[in-house]
Image (cartoon, coloured by chain):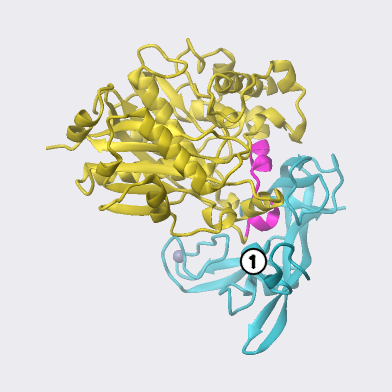
Chain colours: A yellow, B cyan
Amino acid sequence: MDRNVCVIAGGMSKWGVRDGSQRDFFQEAAKACYDDNPQLNPKEIDGLLVASAYTERTSYQTHLAPLVAEYAGIKPKNICARVELLCASGSSAIILAFAMIKSGQADVVMVAGGEKLYTPQKWEVFYSELASVDHDWDGGQGLGLPPPVFAMVAKQHMAQYGTKKEHLGVVSVKNRRNSAKNPKAQFQTEVTMEEVMSGRMIVPPLTLYDCCPITDGAACIVLAVEEKAKQMTDKPLVYIRGTAQASVNNMSANMPNWTTWEALKIAAQQAYSKSKVDPKEVNVAMTHDCFTISEIIEMEDLGFCKKGEGGFFVADGQNDFGGQVPTNTDGGLLGCGHPFGGTGIRQGMEVTRQLRGDAIQQVPNATIGLTHNLSGFIAAHTVLIYGREVA
Amino acid sequence: MSTPGISILDGKYMVTMDLWPQQSKEFNQIHLFYEYLKEGRFTTTKCKDCGSEPFPPRVMCPDCYSVNLEWVDWPTIGTVIDVTEEAVGVPLGFGKPPLVHALVDLDGKKTFFVRIINCKTGELKSGDKVKLAVFDVDPVPQEFGREVVEMPRVFYAFEPVK
Ligand SMILES: [Zn+2]
């Protein structure tokens, strides 16, 4: 008999420029997760996967999972390990937890992810980013911080498809409007198109509001096999239908195409196929809006609109409430911030809420949700599809 | 050489904080890339079995998995496809803004996204030629028994052809 996998709880710490340490935020996230589902007995959690990318660099801590287990008050007996894929660490851990439950290696797995990125002197986090790309090759070109990379993507996309700076602006305005309603988000204020268009120049054509910030924080989600999930929550069950993760290059010199993300197309195709879902059936999506241009290309390569029309699709409101596929309804990376290991888990939480029907800003009757991350030098793409029913 | 906040690290080298790759043969099997770079050559490894020329250089061919490789020279002049100029957020070690990068077609070999040095804001445009520029970076104080030897290092960027 197939073992189906459900999300039964999720919670996050406040995200932002936070007072506190990594271990503080993991406790806050665990508490929020337990509060989300009072029927869940944490003692029944039999596995823990922890997603964190910079724990060694900015918290000087390896062997993180047993530490998080100790602080979260759980005693895993089937798995207790850390997963790292930079910006997609959280989604990677959800995929592995899903696979462990599906295969019978565990029944109830907590996935916790987060980072303490701000150090007592801020230069260190920027400097550490030189290890996020191929350190020996792209790092030495000063490409650790991603704005130049995405500025080049934006310039190329604009030249090839007529995407406009205003299209980028629509994404910032939408995601900041959504985060202003999400009390856990880093940014609690909206921005206007005027403010966005006159924002401080970072790397032309990207200005301040085109870029997600550096963020401290953590998030937790709990997955359970369907039979146990039914006993552990009265809320509607949300299933993971299918997942995929693809990589076709790492170093920048090996990028097959700067404006069509081949690995994203592969991951999306795999996830749709395993989930028996057509892109047009996705009701709500959390995509990796590390930069505004990213969300635009993701609309195209996830199959929500035709190649090259992403800018026009977002400008037409097609990925906002009332459109074809409301995207980043909780504020996304641009609004919530981006503590690398936490992001995929935040996305899974928001999709779960949308499908349960208890999101802060609800997409009416959403039954299929999608999450997407890119990581590194646009070097890997991760797609998960959730649903109110199994595939 | 004091390290504020960590007095015990005074004068100590930290590989975990090093911007640049390790280039000595004890710490890098493709150290010849850097030796050739010092001669102004831009090289990679070519597979003698299948002819593949991957970049970065390898110890195993990623196409046919052979370890029968040889060093070959690549062009040192390329053509600019497009340029970015980073005004804010330039990481430590990369000078004052702007930090200029260009997508460079290296004569059909690869499209490199590389740092451009010796270049003013707005100077570089699509279609311009750029050439390899090699510069010294901090040497690594490497232990050999009880001796500590300063191992010289270089790195590369590109610069406008004037
Ligand atoms: Zn070969």
Q: Is residue B73 above or below residue A205?
A: below
Mark 1 residue CB less than 8 A from any atom of ligand 1:
no
Quarter of the rendered image showing ligand 1: bottom left
Residue A366's spot in the image, x, y percent? 36, 17
Quarter assignment of residue B7: bottom right
Percent of width and height locating residue A161: 61, 25
Can residue B100 be seen at all in this image of the molecule?
yes
Residue assigned mark 1: B21
The spot of residue B113 in percent (x, y) is 66, 49
- Residue at 26 percent of width and 25 percent of height: A237
| Residues shaded magenta | A137-152
Identify the residue at the far bottom of this view. B146
Compared to residue B158, the image places residue A167 above or below, namely above
Q: Is residue A245 left or right of residue B126?
A: left
- Is residue B20 shown above or below A248? below
Q: Is residue A66 left or right of residue B77?
A: left
The chain letter under disc 1 is B
Estimate how packed mark 1 is, as few (under 14), some (14 to 19) or many (20 or more) residues with alpha carbons within 10 Å.
many
Question: What residue is shown at x 71% (from left), y 83% (from top)?
Answer: B149
Q: Nearer the viewer, residue B29 or B49?
A: B29
Q: Which quarter of the image is occupied by the N terminus of chain A?
A: top left
